[in-house]
Amino acid sequence: MMHYVPNRNVDLTQLGIERVLGPDGRADPAQDPRLDTKLVVRMYENMLRARLLDERMQGLQRQGRVGFHVGFRGEEAAVIAAAAALRDTDWIFPCYRELGALLWRGFSLQTYLDNMYGNADDVVHGRQMPDHYTSKQLCYASVSSPIGTQITHAVGYAWAAKLRREDIVSATFFGEGATSSSDFHAGLNFAGVYKVPTVFLCRNNRWAISTSADKQTASESFAGKAIAYGIKGVRCDGNDALAVYRTVQEAVVRASRGEGPTLIEMLTYRLGGHSTSDDPKVYRSDEEVEAWQKQDPILRLRRHLELLGAWHEQDEKQLTARVDSELKQHIEAAEQKPQPELSSAFDDVYAERPWHLTEQLEAMQNGPRPKRGH
């Protein structure tokens, strides 16, 4: 077994992990899943779109126009390629860095921005922080901020599907820091014992806020933790979209056949801060970030498509311009929408509103209100 490599080492060729694309974008013929070029182009377009959106949200937060943002720059392949490998009926239980997976499934950009502003059209009625979205229609559970809680949710859902004899696989994303949570142990232990069809997607982005990966565990790898639970563990280059796709697809097939869960450690890197509330310069060096920027998953996949003759500079300019136009339009619309009605705080609490909530609603509506806002 390979020894765990600290976060400061970026020589991915030495990790003994699943990999298809080299830094120059060339595919290893022996590892290449040979996906349809149109699918690879679509993955690249979604990765670039997510990057541009992430950068815009960062700017809006700094301008005070949205209150908070959780970025995912540098982790686009680990998220979007994984989502691409899942079936549309497979449920995703996210952490808070997987917006790209939801957009891949067709989530409206306007609906996302309404959530960022917490306006009247926000799917969670302004009750959550920004970047806490959900879509039952797209089989995407609500974002979970508490560390690791989505892991047991994913296992429970897949266990129920198995009991109903439904061919549904659940996939749950989490950072390497969540492997220190009790829900990680409970989820993997239960899934291993009962062969639950769950794919555990660990984004090892090297930093759990300010705790580096080599300070997070004494295990030789995070994928190696699978051994204790009697399940399959795999490591893949999380900055290699084709390797992520192949690895996740194989895990989905195994789970669907009743062969149990898989823990996948996707080695990647968080190029930005943990969130807009974080200053990563306090705990990591510029040299480390610069070294990982050379492993940029978007740049690597673009080089691959250019070698195939499937992507050109003009394509890049057109997509960038189109995304910029979309963002301007949807941001303007989101900013013009009113705040949620106060009465919405009493909705979706019970199937039928009980008497005490009805009394509270009436008291709120008839009581004195400030002249502006809530």
Image: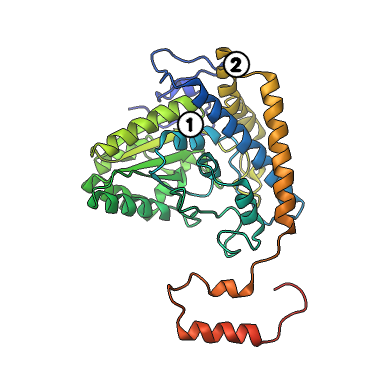
**In the depicted structure, whether residue 56 falls above or below residue 163:** above
Earlier along the polypeptide chain: callout 1 or callout 2? 1
Please identify the quarter of the rendering in which residue 290 is found.
Answer: top right
Badge 1 marks a residue whose secondary structure is: loop
**In the depicted structure, whether residue 312 falls above or below residue 89:** above
Please indicate whether residue 342 sits to the left or right of residue 1 in the image: right
Provide residue 114's location: percent of width, then percent of height: 64, 55
Q: Amino acid at mark 2?
A: Glu
Q: Quadrant of the C terminus?
A: bottom right
Reading the image, the residue beneath label 2 is 306
Please identify the quarter of the rendering in which residue 251 is found.
Answer: top left
Point 55% across, 35% down: residue: 76
Provide residue 219's location: percent of width, then percent of height: 36, 39
Mark pair 1, 2: CA separation: 21 Å
> Badge 1: few (under 14), some or many (20 or more) residues near its Cα, within 10 Å?
many
Provide residue 361's location: percent of width, then percent of height: 57, 82
Point 43% across, 25% down: residue: 15
Reading the image, the residue beneath label 1 is 238
Badge 2 marks a residue whose secondary structure is: helix
Is the Cβ of the residue at disc 1 closer than 8 Å to that at disc 2? no
Q: Amino acid at mark 1?
A: Gly
* Front residue (pair 150, 265): 150
